Amino acid sequence: MFNVLWLQSGGCGGCSLSLLNAESPNLITRFKSAQINMLWHPSLSEASADEFINMLDDILSDKIQLDALCLEGSVMQGPNGTGKFHMLAGTGKPMMTWLEELAEKAHYTLAIGSCAAFGGITAAGNNPGEACGLQYDGKKAGGLLGAEWRTASQFPVINVAGCPTHPDWVTDVLSQLAMGDLKLNHLDELNRPRAYTDHLVHHGCGRSEYYEYKASAEELGDIGCFMEHKGCLGTQARADCNIRPWNGKGSCLNGGYPCINCTAPEFEEPRLNFTETPKIAGIPIGLPTDMPKAWFVALSSLSKAATPKRLKDNATASKIITPPGNKTP
Amino acid sequence: MTRKILGPFNRVEGDLEVEVEIADGIVTKAWVNSPLYRGFEQILQGKPPMDALTYTPRICGICSVSQSIACASALAQIQNITPPSNGQLVSNLILACENIADHLTHFYLFFMPDFARDSYQNKSWHKNISNRFRAQTGTATPTMLKARAEFMHITGILAGKWPHTLSIQPGGTTTSVSASDKIQLLGILTSFREFLETQLFADTLENIIQLETDDSLKSWMENHPQADFAEFLQIAEDLDLHKLGKIDAKFMSYGVYTHEDNSFLPQGLWANGELSELDTNLIKEDISSSWMLSQNGAKHPYQGNTLPDPDQADGYSWCKAPRYNEQVIEVGAHARQTIAQNPLALDLAKNSQSNVRNRVIARLLELARIVPEMEKWVRQINPEEPFQIISKLPDEAEGQGIIEAARGSLGHWIRVRNGRILNYQIIAPTTWNFSPRDKDDIAGALEQALIGTEVDNEGNGSVAIQHVVRSFDPCMVCTVH
């Protein structure tokens, strides 16, 4: 069995609750299929208080083998580096100290969600909690454990980033680790699993035709493309949200609002605000990933000139008003 | 007399520490500490007001939609707009989905597994309960997780995803429901109803809703022994859970599920058998026992601020102490249902005030009452009509957004100056229930509820304390935020 310990610190618990959304099969059956033994998870385990603290001590004294340590939520270093913003209940010891000690025992260490990976939402604004990730502080490598830190298995912290994470992203990587299938080259440049970051949120987006013809939405809830006006980062964001649906058939774009690139470090401080595209002289800033600027500008102006009436009509409506096949008068 | 620090308590959302004073095996005093501070109220200062719709859901991954709605309502008040009928219906459906899923998760994953503990192995019911509810291995867990995940497809259709949606806006929702979506939504609800009517209640929701007295509930229990709900009622009777975690019922509800000026669960206060009107001007937060820089007396949230200071000598929690007209208040499903004048909730409150048993019953009663409403809301959606109205935000304004989350009353208070957030204050349900002492040394609701709990002299592994704590379904990440 593959022993997993899941701890929470400066986060919202949303990645755990998202994990419970796993289906076909459900979470418990998924664990069973990969022979994962959840040593302890705050929402799933019986052990509380002393029973739990004794278990942590047993891990530190090598009585229990720890295959994977998962942290959900940011590392709370404040105030003034003391870690007092999160003392693990019943222990009088800062959670960040527990994490440093337990990470040394874990065969693999995983940051679940963008908070644990990079600091995330908890690090927004003036970062009052001095929140950071396990091995990153925003875009900068380092964080709690330091850029050069590696587990006994020579792995960096695996950053299962997202706000929240998709349940499949978490169970996929845990299952691959349990089966011995995950290799270092399966991680991207920010140590996120390439299983989902080799894709862009743009892939499979239901608004693709509007994107192609630059038929843009003006308000949230419109069915046109959100890139030009509404701050959508789907053409840059690394995730498979429109290929691997959320809660049955959902995604942010299907929900009528833009991608905010929540798998990326520092997404919590948008360029202008979350739902508005910054522009210079009326030209939106930001290019689709891997797109040469001159070509993008040229193609955009060309496609904009060729936009069918149907797409122009529908882009700024909340439901289809002009169906396909209508001839332009 | 001994003092003992207990924690962490899992199967609550976030981290929690409780200190108890024990004399002769009975808890005589308790102090509740929320040991995690993140600083959302500080993070929000200076941000564009509309960005609060992205930040505030992330206060909490379990009450995320409630946070969205409180925020959107505060912004709507600033804009002086009311969402159209469709927008209200869709918001209600998303919120109900979250709240109902929370009640279900609480019952199956957070609360019942404690009865499967070995400390109850001499009980006649232990073998059955252990087989069905033991953490991770109980037979109920995979079945419930499947039903919950499929029920959450409602959020996939209406909110894009859960948690953390941006579909809820001041003027309505960004999702428009098509005729085909309506059919899918009804299918999901019917399928979820089947789960409830075979597993949780082993009876129709309509029959559960019609239970009007504690006595009728008892005879229902005897006639439906195979229901998970009945299993709980039997344990409650055996362990006298109506005497555990008991406090005088002083209830508040902000009201919820409003459609065209009518709230299915209305707002109000309830104490000593009397219902009274809510006046949010009487809400103040005291920080006498909080690790917060001192301010001049308790403040209404418009005037309140949040300046953490771990060296405050009298502090023992990051949580502030909200009071209504200087009174300690309990919030949650029992409060909501009592204020809504549901006969069973009223009968429970009159017979035995607020306690572990009543809190759990009220959640399941609410579950049975809301699902049929959701079916009605879906049918009322008119795909031809708009789902939102768009309006500009003034540069100077203040707004209040109040709503009922699964765990009780949630309020956001926002002040905008020069188009930016000047102050943003949040009072969450568990801030009410798990508040520390105030300036008059009056303990919070859980602190009072723990008094009289029987434990061993060390307080170790006291499962009774865990029942009391978990009966509130605490959400600690909301509590301090």
Image (tube, helix red, strand yellow):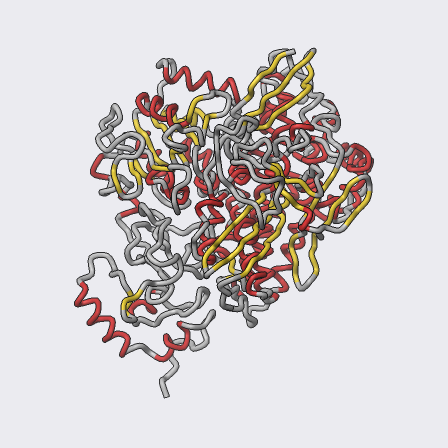
Residue A98 visible, this orientation: yes
Q: Is residue B225 visible?
A: no
Q: Position of residue A30 (x, y in %)?
A: 42, 35
Instruction: Kindly identify the residue that appears in the image at 36 percent across and 30 percent down.
Output: A81
- Residue B176 picture location, percent across and down: 51, 65
Location of residue B295 with respect to B386 vertically, above or below: above
Q: Is residue A148 left or right of residue A329?
A: left
Front one among B449 and B12? B449
Image quarter of residue B69: bottom right
Task: Decide: is A273 above or below B451.
Answer: below
Q: Residue furthest front?
A: B296
Tell me what residue is drawn at x 23 percent, y 57 percent: A289
* Image quarter of the N terminus of chain B: top right
Query: Is B406 left or right of B176, judged from the image as shown?
Result: right
Residue at the outermost bottom position: A329
Q: Determine which quarter of the picture holds residue B171.
A: bottom right
Foreground: A106 or A178? A106
Q: Is residue B366 left or right of residue A1?
A: right
Find residue B60 and report its horizontal and vertical position in percent. 50, 43
Tell which of B63 and A184 is nearer to you.
B63
Residue A327 rendering spot, x and y as whole percentages: 36, 84
